[in-house]
Image (cartoon, rainbow, N blue to C red):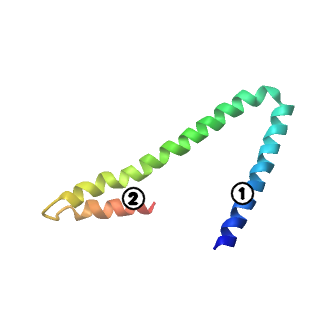
Amino acid sequence: MKVKFLLFFIVSFILLLIFWYYISCFCCIYENTQIHLFKDSLMSFVISLIYPIFINLLPGIFRIPSLNNKKGDKLCMYKFSQIIEFF
């Protein structure tokens, strides 16, 4: 397991350096695209932080009321939350 983790981090670091070099060369050649690249990268980062919140919150909206119900008649809400969680 340690060898796999070490190999994963080494390969990831090498790929990160290659991508960094590629982006640096691209921005050096096309100087007017630096601001657009920065904005697009920042927007992509923010979206990748926000959308998992909604994806994980949606099944909980249906599951919490179904689990708090004492009678147990909201089984369909619980099943629906499991289906949403599957996707």
| Residue ID at (81%, 38%) | 24
Q: Residue furthest front?
A: 2
Mark 1 Cα-neighbour bin, 10 Å: few <14, some 14–19, many ≥20: few
Check disc 1 and give the amino acid type.
Ser
* Image quadrant containing the N terminus: bottom right
Q: Nearer the viewer, residue 11 or 42?
A: 11
Q: Residue furthest bottom?
A: 1
Q: Nearer the viewer, mark 2 or mark 1?
A: 1
Q: Nearer the viewer, residue 65 or 24?
A: 24
| Quarter of image, res 65 | bottom left
Q: Where is residue 7 drawn, in percent x and y?
A: 72, 66
| Residue ID at (17%, 65%) | 72
| Residue ID at (55%, 45%) | 48
Check disc 2 and give the amino acid type.
Ile
Tell me if residue 51 comes above or below residue 78 in the rendering.
above
Q: Which residue is mark 1?
A: 12
The Cα atoms of the two marked residues, 2 and 1, are separated by 32 Å
Q: Which mark is residue 84?
A: 2
